[in-house]
């Protein structure tokens, strides 16, 4: 499929007629501020458009789709910022097909890619496109952003002519990316808010009473439920434990290409059959069992990366702590905490079994909710996501042009077109 050319709505030619003067500096600053706000709002709208209908598709695919859109989103925002700056200074600017743009009568090429060596850094290059050896500044300034996305740093490299604009360009890139990630984070928390936590609250309270701090924060509960003669299970968390999961996933962002949101989601929603878990070994021996994530029986499913991030350890100990006719409750913790956690959990076994029996129905409901989030309903996608963008390409062939979408939303906002939903 041919790529739709971007920036048709925003391409412009600004020709010098009068330089900026002290008398209009205040107005120019306000214009740039307004432009920055528009860039941030447009980035949020792009995220909302990409998230339309995603309740029907697996979470892992959602985050991969969002991160794939980031380079074009940031490139669009940076070029938009330069367009606004050129208009305010009344100098020549033109943004046309592909990644080319003209700023102050000089042809440039924009290129936004993941950094070659720093996994959590996005590299933005704005270099002259009409010279054999373009003049490039030695500076590579950076700026940081927060959120649950893959990138926490933006690094900039430009031609010498754009060097005075480094601060503004980085600000535009960070505003766009930060707003995009904020929308993703809010959507993520809304989606997880649908999971029941009443059973987890009771069970974690009992664990925290038995295990002293700070070790209690490193104990994670698995609940396996009997379904059609076999047990399957997943982690269960209350609000406090969920926050720890997201915090720790964020702290390991520089060690993987996956976003903290994706890592946390893998941890919180992965469902395993009992026989493919470390718990199976423990049940077979009747004792707590130790294991290493690098050799986990579920290694082929990719969950071990998320577990390493959350446990902050290379291995774990699994300890069944309670069971009923239809459920098994398992505590898991970093391998080096056995002497601090094992006996306190044994002492809490009676209380944990009572709570397991009392919350069994809620635990089964939790697992069904997790299954819904994990699997989604792909058959509903075509009528929701792509139709909202007025695109008729079948899903397997889809190559959504983020620049086109950014441009379309920005143009609609300038015309007063609501919240920017395409």
Image (cartoon, rainbow, N blue to C red):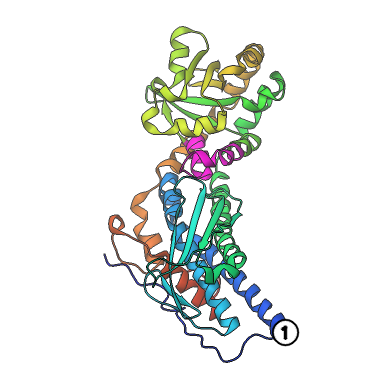
- Count the marks: how many? 1
Q: 350 or 44: which is nearer to us?
A: 44
Horizontal relation, residue 215 to residue 79: left or right:
right
In x, y percent, where is residue 294?
43, 25
Looking at the image, the residue that sits furthest to the left is 1
Badge 1 element: helix
Horizontal relation, residue 29 to residue 237: left or right:
right
User: What is the crowding at mark 1: few (fewer than 14 residues within 10 Å), some, or many (at least 20)?
Assistant: few
Q: Quadrant of the N terminus?
A: bottom left
Majority secondary structure of magenta residues: helix
Q: Residue at x 32, y 59 (%)?
A: 398
The residue pinned by badge 1 equals: 22
In x, y percent, where is residue 213?
72, 24
Q: 374 or 158: which is nearer to us?
A: 158
For the question of whether residue 417 can be seen, the reply is no
Horizontal relation, residue 68 to residue 415: left or right:
left
For the question of whether residue 205 can be seen, the reply is yes
In x, y percent, where is residue 321?
57, 16
- Point out the stretch of residues depicted in magenta: 246-269
Q: 119 or 181: which is nearer to us?
A: 119
């Amino acid at each position: 499929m041919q790529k739709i050319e971007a920036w048709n709505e925003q391409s412009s030619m600004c020709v010098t007629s009068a330089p900026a003067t002290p008398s209009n500096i205040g107005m120019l600053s306000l214009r740039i501020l307004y432009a920055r706000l528009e860039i941030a709002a447009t980035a949020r709208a792009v995220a909302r458009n990409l998230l339309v209908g995603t309740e029907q598709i697996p979470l892992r695919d959602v985050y991969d789709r969002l991160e794939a859109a980031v380079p074009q989103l940031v490139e669009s925002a940076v070029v938009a910022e330069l367009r606004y700056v050129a208009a305010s200074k009344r100098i020549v600017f033109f943004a046309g097909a592909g990644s080319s743009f003209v700023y102050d009568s000089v042809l440039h090429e924009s290129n936004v890619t993941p950094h070659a060596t720093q996994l959590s850094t996005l590299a933005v290059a704005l270099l002259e496109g009409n010279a054999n050896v373009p003049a490039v500044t030695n500076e590579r300034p950076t700026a940081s952003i927060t959120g649950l996305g893959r990138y926490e740093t933006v690094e900039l490299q430009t031609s010498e002519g754009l060097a005075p604009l480094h601060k503004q360009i980085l600000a535009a890139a960070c505003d766009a990316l930060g707003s995009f990630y904020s929308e993703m984070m809010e959507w993520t928390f809304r989606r997880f808010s649908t999971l029941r936590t009443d059973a987890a609250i009771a069970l974690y309270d009992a664990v925290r009473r038995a295990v002293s701090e700070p070790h209690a924060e490193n104990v994670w509960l698995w609940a396996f439920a009997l379904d059609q003669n076999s047990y399957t299970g997943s982690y269960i968390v209350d609000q406090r434990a969920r926050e720890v999961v997201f915090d720790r996933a964020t702290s390991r962002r520089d060690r993987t290409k996956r976003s903290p949101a994706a890592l946390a989601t893998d941890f919180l929603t992965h469902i395993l059959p009992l026989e493919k878990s470390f718990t199976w070994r423990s049940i077979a021996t009747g004792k707590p069992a130790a294991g290493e994530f690098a050799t986990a029986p579920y290694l082929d499913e990719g969950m071990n990366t998320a577990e390493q991030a959350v446990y902050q350890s290379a291995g774990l100990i699994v300890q069944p702590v309670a069971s009923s006719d239809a459920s098994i409750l398992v505590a898991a913790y970093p391998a080096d905490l056995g002497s601090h956690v094992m006996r306190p959990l044994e002492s809490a076994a009676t209380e944990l079994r009572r709570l397991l029996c009392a919350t069994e129905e809620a635990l089964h409901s939790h697992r069904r909710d997790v299954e819904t989030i994990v699997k989604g309903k792909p058959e509903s996608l075509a009528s929701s996501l792509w139709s909202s963008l007025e695109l008729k390409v079948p899903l397997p062939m889809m190559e959504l042009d983020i620049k086109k979408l950014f441009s379309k939303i920005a143009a609609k906002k300038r015309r007063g077109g609501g919240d920017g939903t395409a």
